[in-house]
Amino acid sequence: MNTNDYINLLNNSKAINDKQTLILETIVQEFPFYQSARALYLKGLYNQESFRYNYELKKTAAHTTDRTVLFEFITSENFVSIQQDKIDEIQKALLNIEVHH
């Protein structure tokens, strides 16, 4: 994946396909603190309706310095719509995750 492809994914994250999700997974494994890559990987998992989404959501939240930004990114218009009660559940989960140093 080149820089232009990555920037395009940031601008249109709902277009992340299976192949790009695998590439993003590799990037996250190599650079675990790369927050935007984690967020894009998470959206790719969501787009695929992957069973790993909830697990990766917790990991992404733990690696995110500002969880409100992550929450807004996940629930943005570009992201597939989630029911309001699910949004409330995700927000509470993100704000209550304890990060141990």
Image: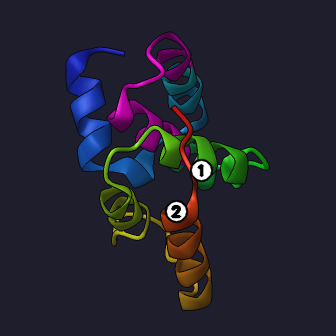
Q: Position of residue 28 (x, y in %)?
A: 50, 22
Q: Position of residue 73 (x, y in %)?
A: 35, 60
Looking at the rendering, the stretch of residues picked out in magenta corresponds to 26-42
* Left or right: residue 3 compared with residue 75: left
Amino acid under disc 2 = Leu
Is residue 32 magenta-colored? yes
Q: Which residue is drawn at the image coordinates 22% and 33% (left, top)?
A: 7
Task: Please tell me in which quadrant of the rendered image residue 46 appears.
Answer: bottom right
Is residue 33 magenta-colored? yes
Residue in the foreground of this view, choosing between 80 and 53: 53
Q: Which residue is drawn at the image coordinates 46% and 35% (left, top)?
A: 38
From the image, give the main secondary structure of the stretch colored magenta.
helix
The disc label shown at residue 7, or none: none
Q: Which residue is drawn at the image coordinates 33% and 67% (left, top)?
A: 72
Task: Please tell me in which quadrant of the rendered image residue 44 appears.
Answer: top right
Helix, strand or loop under label 2 = helix
Q: How did the renderer colour the structure?
A: rainbow
Q: Position of residue 62 (x, y in %)?
A: 51, 43
Q: Which residue is mark 2?
A: 94
As drawn, which residue projects farthest toward the bottom? 84
* Left or right: residue 35 compared with residue 10: right
Mark 2 or mark 1: whose residue is earlier in sequence = 1
Q: Which residue is mark 1?
A: 57
* Label 2: how many Cα within 10 Å (few below 14, some 14–19, many 20+): many
Amino acid under disc 1 = Leu
Q: Position of residue 98 (x, y in %)?
A: 57, 52
Residue in the foreground of this view, choosing between 94 and 82: 94
* Label 1: how many Cα within 10 Å (few below 14, some 14–19, many 20+): many
* Left or right: residue 47 compared with residue 78: right
Disc 2 + disc 1, Cβ < 8 Å: yes
